[in-house]
Amino acid sequence: KEGYPRAFREAVPRLRIAPFEIDLTPPVGEAIAYGVNRQTDSRIFARGLELDDGRTRTLLGAAEIIGMYGGVHGAWRACAARAAGVPARHVLLHAVHQHDSIRPYSPALRELLRGWNDPVKPSAAFHQELLRRLDSGLRQAVRPGNWSAVRALATAERRLEGLASNRRLVGPDGKVFATRWSMTSDPKLQRHPVGRIDPLLRSIGLFGAGGRLLATLHFYATHPMGAYGRNMVSADI
């Protein structure tokens, strides 16, 4: 139809979406991975959407946190399922893995971190606050007036350069001789070739009536840090 991208067009009968964006930014003094939050460099969010094709409803979400470990994943998934009105098996949650971000609390994780270099451990109180934010944000997102009908899909791929690299550096003998860490300062390792990676940024666009862009999903394989260890929460790359 007129107004839709030329890359790919497809009728999408009955598909509706309800996007969400939930602020997860911790307060000053709260633990973040490898440190404590002294100030906000940039706010962090959980973003995603619920999809309804008339038969099944599914929730997709990505959080700008370092990880969802064990019981944390279970608690977030159960909370999201209740708030969005879907079975837990229909909830897919992903952690983007920023390092200057939160490491949500669970009793098992707190024990695991005992003796690590985190000066402040994740607090149970803030974990409950995050669950309250998740519950409130999702309930608001899936209210009847917040759904939009999807009229077309578009897909795209773009090769990126200068962002990701393989961290295993291979010598002429075919063996790994060094690791290029997230903030490598050794000029020799910095100059080493990128190595074998998936260089493609892949995107899916969902469009509504009149070609209006409703939401975009992006997929790119990287360890998404340009700077960390600064004691300030950040969404980084």
Image (spheres, rainbow, N blue to C red):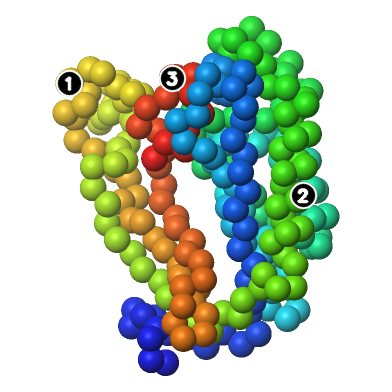
Crowding near pointer 2: few (<14 within 10 Å), some, many (20+)?
many
What amino acid is found at the position of numbered circle 3 in the picture?
A: Arg
For image coordinates 72% across by 65% down, the residue present is: 142
Q: Is residue 119 left or right of residue 8?
A: right
Of discs 1 and 3, which sits in the foreground?
3
Q: Is residue 211 left or right of residue 197?
A: right
Crowding near pointer 3: few (<14 within 10 Å), some, many (20+)?
some
Per the image, label 3 sits on a secondary structure element best described as loop
Lower position in the chain sequence, tag 3 or tag 2: 2
Q: Position of residue 150 (x, y in %)?
A: 57, 79
Q: Give the numbered dot on residue 135.
A: 2
Q: Position of residue 86 (x, y in %)?
A: 79, 62
For image coordinates 49% across by 19% down, the residue present is: 231
Q: Which residue is mark 3?
A: 230
Q: Give the numbered dot on residue 188.
A: 1
What amino acid is found at the position of numbered circle 1 in the picture?
A: Lys
Q: Which residue is at the front of the view, 183 or 49?
A: 49
